[in-house]
Image (tube, rainbow, N blue to C red):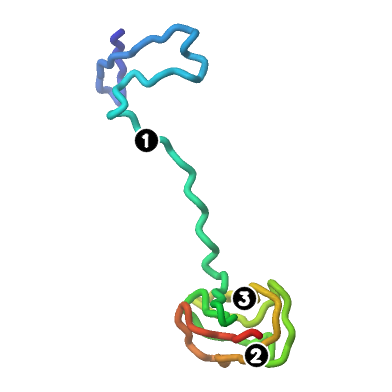
């Protein structure tokens, strides 16, 4: 069946295939060849939070972003819990809390307030 469609004043003729009711219950087959059909749309996975700290096998908490260390919330010897804020960074006039991704004891603090750090730079070592 041919139909005429007008879009923004322009007239278009299109071919339309009419399917009977037994096929049109949500399981209709595409009327175009499979090679021309659009690929199925899949939901993209959400990205990991950019402010999540990185921990290596040596239990080193690394900088999640480029920024400046504003203040430290822990000292060497402190026992920390998962999600406890270890330090605060500033990047582009926004403060970012860097939280502990695991429980442990602070073995060493490798940065000081005012230090500029790069993404992936070691910040704190946990035992």
* Residue receiving disc 3: 97
Can you tell which mark lies on residue 58?
A: none
- Give the quarter of the image for residue 90: bottom right
Mark 1, secondary structure of its residue: loop
Which one is closest to the eye, mark 2 or mark 3? 2
Question: Counting residues from the N terminus, which is met first, the one under dot 2 or under dot 3?
Answer: 3
Q: How many numbered marks does the figure carry?
A: 3
Mark 2, secondary structure of its residue: strand
Say if 57 sits above or below 28 in the image. below
Can you tell which mark lies on residue 39?
A: 1
Contact? badges 2 and 1 (CB < 8 Å): no
Q: Tell me: 75 left or right of 122.
A: right
Q: Please provide percent x and percent y for residue 110.
A: 56, 91
Residue drawn at the location 60% of the way across and 86% of the way down? 125
Residue drawn at the location 58% of the way across and 76% of the way down? 95
Q: Tell me: 35 left or right of 69.
A: left
Residue count near mark 2 (Cα–Cα under 10 Å), binned few <14, some 14–19, many ≥20: some
* Residue receiving disc 2: 107
Contact? badges 2 and 3 (CB < 8 Å): no
Residue drawn at the location 28% of the way across and 14% of the way down? 15
Q: Please provide percent x and percent y for residue 103.
A: 70, 76
Q: Tell me: 111 left or right of 101.
A: left
Say if 120 sits above or below 35 in the image. below
> What is the distance, in whole Å, between disc 2 and disc 1 at their CAs?
52 Å
Residue drawn at the location 44% of the way across and 18% of the way down? 28
Q: Quadrant of the C terminus?
A: bottom right
Q: Quadrant of the N terminus?
A: top left
> What is the distance, in whole Å, between disc 1 and disc 3 at their CAs?
41 Å
Mark 3, secondary structure of its residue: strand
Question: Counting residues from the N terminus, which is met first, the one under dot 2 or under dot 1?
Answer: 1
> What is the distance, in whole Å, between disc 2 and disc 3 at their CAs?
20 Å
Q: Please provide percent x and percent y for residue 63.
A: 52, 79
């Amino acid at each position: 069946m041919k139909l005429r469609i007008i879009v923004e004043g322009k007239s278009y003729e299109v071919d339309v295939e009419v399917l009977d009711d037994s096929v049109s219950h949500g399981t209709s087959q595409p009327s175009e060849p499979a090679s021309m059909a659009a690929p199925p749309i899949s939901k993209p996975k959400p990205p990991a939070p950019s402010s999540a700290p990185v921990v290596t096998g040596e239990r080193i908490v690394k900088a999640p972003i480029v920024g400046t260390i504003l203040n430290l919330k822990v000292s060497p010897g402190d026992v920390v819990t998962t999600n406890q804020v270890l330090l605060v960074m500033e990047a582009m006039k926004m403060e970012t809390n860097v939280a502990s991704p695991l429980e442990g004891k602070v073995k060493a603090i490798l940065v000081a307030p005012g230090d500029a750090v790069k993404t992936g730079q070691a910040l704190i070592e946990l035992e």
